[in-house]
Image (cartoon, rainbow, N blue to C red):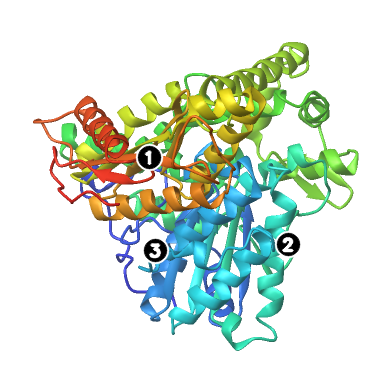
Amino acid sequence: MTMAGRQKSPNLIQTVADLDFPGGPIPLDSPFYIERSGAEALVCAEISKPGGLVRIKAPRKMGKSSLMLRIIDAAVDRGYRTVTLDFQQADTAVFASLHNFLRWLCVNVARQLKLEPNIDEFWDEDMGSKVSCTIYFENYLLEQIDSPIVLVINEINRVFERTNIAQDFLSVIRFWYEQSRASKTWEKLRIVVIHSTENYIALNVNQSPFNVGMPIKLSEFTVEQVQDLACRYGLNWSDRDPIEQLMNMVGGHPYLVHLALYHLAILQQNRLSVDRDEPGEELGRAELAELLTAAPTHSGIYSDYLQNQSIAIQQHPELASAFQQVVDAKKSIHLEPLMAYQLESMGLVKLEGNNCSLSCELYRLYFQGQNLCQDKLSVVRFEELQQENQRLQALVNVDELTQIGNRRHFDSCLRTEWEHMAREGSPISLILCDLDYFKIYNDTYGHQAGDDCLRSVAQTIRRSLQRPADVAARYGGEEFAVILPETDASAAVVVAEEIRAKVKALNIVFNPQSLDGLPNSVVTISLGIASVVPSEENDAVTLLLAADEALYDSKRQGRDRLTMSTLLNFRLAAVN
């Protein structure tokens, strides 16, 4: 299993259009990808083994995402099925609880494997989310797929920071890895875990928070690799002097090297377009000298990168103070081990035995004119304000009584999903729900019982939704609303019927004397459904009105039922 095949042979750059700006993962067919001293071969060998697990860790912009693309490509070439989970793309609500998170994970994996989620068939609230998730993988996903499955988990560091789910989720991954040693079924699962190490700052630990499987730590480029890359950018320096000058400034940091060579290649191509002659080597050296002179300043090409590093370190005053000592020192110094470890995790220092020194001269030149500790009180206050804003944002969007979305959240989500589905040309469905005779229930049993009833129903509706994009909200009073993006009428009817049946199954006793003919009754719910593919001929208000009309029909026809609107694209008969 190799990673060869799609990358172009290194060629001289002919035009500016041939250049890739080094701002993200390097495409598979790019000539600018440099193999990482055997890391690719080690990863491929490990995921070829039954139950293999690889941990790839490095600071940001060290090439993890570019390597990830090639791992996936190599797995596909071998005939493996691949699933990629990127926690950067997960909504904040996904991390609210272990229950939400593991269901989100299971649904994502199923969808990427082209399987219906069927998650409720395997989920048992009494057994807990961890066991349910494991049963789902073992008895459903792994049973359905014959070939090995490579599960790539990108930016798992987002989970490390969530104390409410991190320990439990990582223990699940460890358990799966251990199961592969004894189970043929689990042998099919190969796992690649990728994470940025900057998060170690906040963890207050001096070891990796996840330490099973084969560790792969991405290293910096060597002199030979930088020289090779310079040739690929069309910079044919006859000796190593320019390469050494560049590396004296930025070390072998892949992103910093790429960015410098990219700008030098741009300058060379611009000069070619004017002079129509090959630029002389001395001219290339002069441009390099000018670039390196400006590099540690606010006008240099690394300005944004350096400012982000500065902001990150100033958010931790003790760490900023330790780093200031390294910047001011003329040689390597000894730091408290945790401080040294955390600074290394950011890529700012290199460890030399018990001492540490700056990773490159760029950091010394940029940070030596700053007092990283002078604004530590304002930095702490800024962090507190950010946290308070996050709490306020949650309060703004969550209904206090039922702990699901409120009307404001519903309106925002409906507008956003409508626009999204309009761009995609995909259907969107809306379910409006109303508790039957709730005013009479409230008058009969009291407001406390009424509140308890609303909470139970709201959480039942939430648990009936299988996909992270689905939204449940309290629409007002005893009314609830459900937004189902990428869902047609027939699928929406299935969800609505599940809600109706589960609410009735709560067996909330309701035996009102004022309603003849309903002895020993329970609380029920009526639902109206509308589905449409957004177009210029309709809008979200039309969808809302159609669902409301369908809800009214359910009430009029006897309650405890659902009705599908016939006003829009999708038309189904009323469902009793």
Residue at point 31% right, 61% down? Answer: 29
Instruction: Please state the horizontal and vertical placement of residue 197, each as a whole percent of the image.
Output: 67, 47
Q: Earlier in the sequence, mark 3 or mark 2?
A: 3
Q: Amino acid at mark 3?
A: Gln
Q: Nearer the viewer, mark 3 or mark 1?
A: 1
Q: CA distance from mark 3 to mark 2?
A: 23 Å
Q: Is residue 540 left or right of residue 559?
A: left
Residue at the disc numbered 3: 112
Along the line of sight, which residue is nearer the eye, 157 or 196? Answer: 157
Q: Amino acid at mark 2?
A: Ser
Q: CA distance from mark 1 to mark 2?
A: 42 Å
Residue at the disc numbered 1: 526
Residue at point 31% right, 50% down? Answer: 492
Q: CA distance from mark 3 to mark 1?
A: 34 Å
Residue at the disc numbered 2: 171
Q: Earlier in the sequence, mark 1 or mark 2?
A: 2
Q: Is residue 125 above or below residue 121?
A: above
Along the line of sight, which residue is nearer the eye, 529 or 169? Answer: 529
Q: Earlier in the sequence, mark 3 or mark 1?
A: 3
Residue at point 46% right, 63% down? Answer: 109
Tag 3, which secondary structure? helix
Residue at point 51% right, 62% down? Answer: 120
Q: Quadrant of residue 554?
A: top left
